[in-house]
Amino acid sequence: MLIEREFNIIDLNSIEIELLDTFNDTFKKNGYTKHKSKKSLISSEDHSVRFIGSTTNVFKKYLTKDVDISDDGFYLVQKCLRTRNTSVLFDDNNIPIWSSYFTAMGIISPSGNLDKVVKDTIEFILKLGIECSRIKLNVSSQDLDLLKCLKKYQVELGYLIEVDGQSNINYYRHTYGMKDVFGRNFNISINYNERKIFKDIGNIVLIERQKIPIAVEMGIGVSTLISKIFGLNNSIESSSISKIIPFKKGIISKFADAISTSVVMMREGVKPGSRDKPRLLRTNLYSISYFRKKLDIDLEKIKQYINDYEKEEFGEVTIVSNNVIDYLNIYEEIK
């Protein structure tokens, strides 16, 4: 089982395969239909976001009045890009714990299947070797229906329940960028190696339109789950970029994440600019220059990092490294 292994970044591929195989097998066996993932990370259907940042962005069409969720629902594995780390790139005291580029696992099911989604999700986590006593579901006392559902299966499945562990109600709420569509959620957390500190790995959300339930979804990030299973510092440490740039606490992890983010954006055809997605890319490229000077890394080493990362993550080397170096040369000459 996954939790019985020792984490080594060299073994990341096999760890991810084992985790994803368990996810796919569990939800397929329990009646869900595999959903096709999006190849491009630029969000073309969900215009409330720039990039696909979760399986929700792919499932969003099922939250409209025109598309129904059939049978038990869908399960999905999707590459994602979230750019929230961009806002703190130049704040050396703010070190993000989330990787910008990651793989997400998610399901969406009819709203009447809340009980089933809870049981199937716990089954998936248990199959990874995580004992039930190390699983905690965090819920708001305002959500009596969610609390009732969790209590119904607590004895059978053995997980812990924490009520009002967070004072901010937004911890238990979801927005979807759609009028009248909101979600009430409970978060899933686990601890590692019998430590008492629980860390969030994902959530289950009851989605409602004008307070009428329309769907239930679950989402967990692969690198986040791996980092929590093995007690790592953050999900950047359990991402493929750390195979190329060995993880260390501090700004080097931000540098590595900026490299990964820039490569992914440029492979999506984004070019540096002053607005929207191009501005986000430009900021990440600026930060690479900023970090390389602080860390005393020359341009040739950055080029090698990018080539190695492309080869590792995408199986090919393109002209991205040349374009990055050209941009950094221009930027640093102007400055």
Image: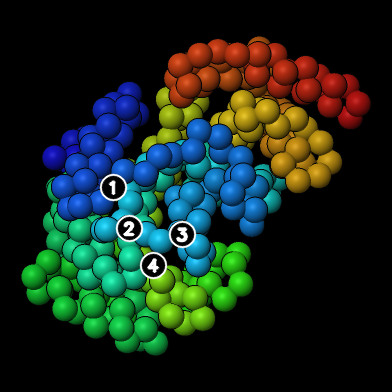
Label 1 near label 2: C-beta < 8 Å?
Answer: yes
Check residue 215 in the rendering and tell me which mark sits there, or answer none.
4
Label 3 near label 2: C-beta < 8 Å?
Answer: no
Q: Is residue 34 shown left or right of residue 169?
A: left
Residue in view at x 59 percent, y 53 percent: 46
Q: Earlier in the sequence, mark 4 or mark 2?
A: 2
Label 2: which residue?
70
Label 3: which residue?
67
Q: What is the crowding at mark 4: few (fewer than 14 residues within 10 Å), some, or many (at least 20)? A: many
Query: Label 2 sits on what residue type?
Result: Ser
Q: In front here: 105 or 237?
A: 105
Q: Regarding mark 3 in the picture, which secondary structure is present there? A: loop
Rounded to the nearest angstrom, the CA distance separating label 3 from label 4 is 12 Å
Quarter of the picture containing the N terminus is top left
Label 1 near label 4: C-beta < 8 Å?
Answer: no
Residue in view at x 50 percent, y 33 percent: 39
Give the vertical position of 114 relative to 134 (above or below). Answer: below
